[in-house]
Amino acid sequence: MLPDYLFEISWEVCNKVGGIYTVLSTKAETISHIDGLNAIYIGPDLWTEQENPLFTEDKRLWRNWRNSVADEKFKVRCGYWEIPGRPKVILVDFDDYFAEKESFYYMLWDNYKVDSLHAYGDYDDSVLFGYAVGQVIESFYKFHLTAKDNVVVQAHEWQSGSAALYLKKNLPEVGTIFTTHATSIGRSIASNGKPLYDYFEGYNGDQMADELNVQSKHSIEKQSALNVDCFTTVSELTAKECKQLIEREIDVILENGFEKDFVPSGAEFEKRRAEARASRLRVARALTGDKISDDAIIIGIGGRMEMRNKGIDLFLETMIRLKCCAQLQRDVVAFIDVPAWSDTARGDLQKRLASGENEWSTPLRDPYLTHNLCNFDHDAIATTIRNIGLANYDGKSRVKVIYVPCYLKGNDGIFNKDYYDILIGNDLSIYPSYYEPWGYTPLESAAFHIPTVTTNLAGFGLWVNSVLSRRGELADGVAVVERNDSNYFNAADVITKIICTFAKISEAEVADCRRKVALLADKALWKHFIKNYLRAYDHALKAAAERK
């Protein structure tokens, strides 16, 4: 059974924040080709000072409905999301709902025992956004639709869970799906340095939420999961986490796919790759003053600033081992593309890059850092680099580490290229995650034909193992490294050996790795994964039909 209307809710609709944006924006075009399914995406209207570049308003869209609610307290803008497929969007301004915060929180407690007492940070914004969205969908349904229409509402993450809870009470005709991309309590356990896996079966989600002071986020996430028609997540890894910490089993697993329309092909691919490599190497030479060889291996890691969860700590531990590895016969330049609290591009580096020279004989100050940091003395990556001896002061080392602490959007002042136009220049990508429900960064690398290292604690890594029916190796294009709470240093040794092996293999073997990793990435296209979404819609609609 397919829905006639699908309302998909996320804080990241027309709001590029993290991985969920990639999920929704790449899936939208595939959804648009499903006959008879009208998809409407709903997000927060956060752009008050200037126009949202991802959104084009169309005041003709649903004009009669908007006019009918013009005197009510909620404010909406309707239009199109400027992504492939240009799906229809409703952006919701929820500011006026703060006046009703206490009454809504009482309703959540009275009906679902959601604990909002310990709320802080972004909790109020998120939950009131969901409350506003619930009323918007209810109003839209009553104006445009009837009980004959099959309607599904999918809420992503705890930030929109309150919409699903509101609709369960006020619009039970619709089928509801709640998707957790990472449980708030699982992420908190991992982020706080606790051993998530060794004692996994002994953890109680409610108890740990009290201990780590995330009671309110955990509470609304748990109650959203327990009360919707269909509970979903993105991998087998997180499914186990949900069963243990949220105490509901997953109904359908929705792996994160992608569309490769952003990956160039043929001569254009090779041109952009050559440009990216040249840019990477020139920046490294300008910073360090060293004569780095043209055949240097460019290694990359990227993603969110989470030292432990994203495996950035293990990446740096590996670089120390690599620096001391006598078997390494080629130069290595390792780039950490992780946005942090950065300021402007370094003027001294800009001056060198603008000089037209290609070689320098002396390093710049802090020859590992491309941009100024607002918190130089406290930035976790920068301080680790300095403390463990990776700051590139030793000109004799084959291993250079370069920290790029800014968003690569084409205007960073150093590379002046978008992230994908830099990523394509990597020879090897390493994402040794400790906590990674899915893992878009290794999948993106794979899409750009880059041999990739991930772990069995990443959903993507487990998916690769399932596709291959064994553990992924470097020769497969994706090496899946064993990680647990006890083998941190052993994992660093394993990754070091993988890099040393990669440095020795022939050009033909590298080409074979690149071919195989691209084939693996093709198996993760949305055309393969969308069937699981259809299963989730069917599951939710059957539950709604029983209520009808």
Image: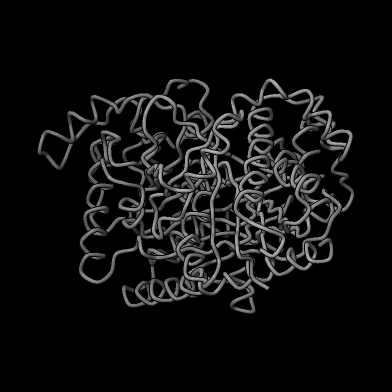
Extreme left residue here?
A: 356
Total label count? 0
Observer-nearest of 301 and 119: 119
Residue 415 position in % (x across, y down): 27, 41
Residue 128 seen from this side: yes
Lateral position of residue 8 relative to residue 443, left or right: right
Residue in the picture at 37% in, 28% down: 50
Residue at figure coordinates x 66%, y 60% from the top left: 151
- In which quadrant of the rendered view does residue 116 lie? top right
Please state the horizontal and vertical placement of residue 142, each as a whole percent of the image: 66, 49
Please, which colouring scheme is shown?
one colour
Q: Give the answer, above or below, for where 388 lies relative to 463.
A: above
Quadrant occupied by the C terminus: bottom right
Can you say which quadrant of the picture contains the N terminus?
Answer: bottom right
Q: Is residue 466 above or below residue 540?
A: below
Please state which of residues 286 and 472 is positioned toward the viewer in this rendering.
472
Q: Position of residue 189 (x, y in %)?
A: 75, 40
Nearer to me, 399 or 129: 129
| Residue pictured at 26% horizontal, 36% vertical | 414
User: Horizontal placement of 348 versus 250: left or right?
Assistant: left
Q: From the viewer's perspective, is 290 left or right of 231?
A: left
Residue 410 position within the rendered picture, expressed as x and y whole percent measured from the top left:
28, 41
- Is residue 138 positioned above or below 373 on the image? below
User: Quick check: can you spot residue 55?
Assistant: no
Q: Please name whichever residue, 520 or 66, is drawn nearer the observer in this view of the structure.
A: 66
